Image (tube, helix red, strand yellow):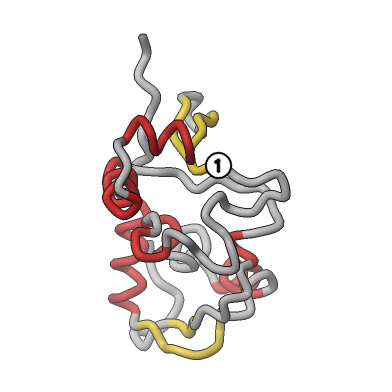
Amino acid sequence: MARWYSSDGLQFSCTQCSHCCRHEPGFVYLSQKDLTNLCLYFNLEEQQFIKQYCRWVPYYDGNEVLCLLEKENNDCIFWDSGCAAYGARPVQCSTYPFWSYIVKSPEAWSQEAEECPGINRGQMHSGSEIEEAVRCYEENEPIRRQEG
């Protein structure tokens, strides 16, 4: 993907508004790395963690994948006046807003900025830093439900 932004990169600093963690339905897909880190962080076995904090949801390819639960109000299961899992937050969370479909064009970046007050403000993230976040996001394959 050819980048439209300069090598200086893009500005983003989280304002801790929590819009990306709350109020709207969404999916936080978990890779094996994410699950392992969260289990270590909460000192839980995988099956116990999955039973308590996860659900299986349909994915783009028709398979079911593992994601975090949401509360009835659509807040992330780990939201409680802040992220209770921040020290082990999933790659999807830690790479935001540097996801491939958000940084693909100035229009997509501007559209996301309408929802996120931290975009185009604060810290400058270099082009190489953004590309690394995109790579991590793209390579973070969610756990697929095993048949049987």
Name the residue rendered at 39%, 38% in the picture: 49
Residue 39 picture location, percent across and down? 31, 46
Q: Quadrant of the N terminus?
A: bottom left
Name the residue rendered at 38%, 39% in the picture: 142
Q: Is residue 86 above or below residue 13?
A: above
Residue 140 seen in render: no
Q: How many marks?
A: 1
Name the foreground residue: 97 vs 57: 57
Q: Quadrant of the C terminus?
A: top left
Q: Secondary structure at mark 1?
A: loop
110 sits left or right of 88 in the view? right
- Say what amino acid the circle numbered 1 marks: Leu
Residue 7 picture location, percent across and down? 34, 84
Name the residue rendered at 68%, 49% in the picture: 74
Quadrant hosting residue 144: top left
11 sits left or right of 1 in the view? right
134 sits left or right of 61 in the view? left
Residue 22 picture location, percent across and down? 65, 59
Quadrant hosting residue 10: bottom left
Residue 48 seen in render: yes
Q: Is residue 41 above or below residue 9?
A: above
Name the foreground residue: 142 vs 114: 142
Quadrant hosting residue 81: bottom right
Name the residue rendered at 56%, 84% in the picture: 120
Q: Residues within 10 Å of mark 1 (few under 14, many from 20)?
A: many
In this view, the residue farthest toward the front is 43
Q: Mark 1 — residue?
A: 69
Q: Is residue 143 above or below residue 95?
A: above
Name the foreground residue: 125 vs 89: 89
Residue 113 picture location, percent across and down? 63, 74
